[in-house]
Amino acid sequence: MMAENDLESKFRTGLFIIAMILTLIATLHFYFSAQDAIHTWFEWQYAPIFSAVFSFAVIVACIGLTWFYIISRR
């Protein structure tokens, strides 16, 4: 029989995994929606520039979050 604490730990881990999957889906949806908005709001000549700046900002944010949450907690 499982200990009460072990069951609670597995439940919290499962909730965390589900939340991360939903966050990933929402992030991808936001990213592609932002790309569509860039192509709608800006002239076609400038859309690739703003798209590249947005993509670069997403990359920097992901690297920063990875560094902060994973590497700095070792």
Image: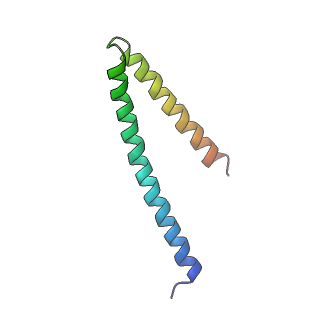
* Residue at horizontal 38 percent and vertical 47 percent from the top: 25
Residue 21 in the image, given as x and y percentages of width and height:
41, 53
Seen in the picture, residue 28 relative to 60 is either above or below; the reply is below
In front of the other: 53 or 42: 42
Q: Quarter of the image holding residue 8?
A: bottom right
Residue 20 in the image, given as x and y percentages of width and height:
46, 54
Q: Residue furthest front?
A: 41
Residue 56 in the image, given as x and y percentages of width and height:
49, 27
* Residue at horizontal 52 percent and vertical 67 percent from the top: 12
Would residue 36 be found to the left or right of residue 23 on screen?
A: left
* Residue at horizontal 42 percent and vertical 42 percent from the top: 27
Q: Residue furthest top?
A: 45
Q: Quarter of the image holding residue 35?
A: top left
Seen in the picture, residue 21 relative to 54 is either above or below; the reply is below
User: How many labels were placed on the picture?
Assistant: 0
What scheme was used to colour the molecule? rainbow
Q: Which residue lies furthest to the bottom in this view?
A: 1
Q: Quarter of the image holding residue 26?
A: top left
Residue 45 in the image, given as x and y percentages of width and height:
34, 11
* Residue at horizontal 52 percent and vertical 77 percent from the top: 7
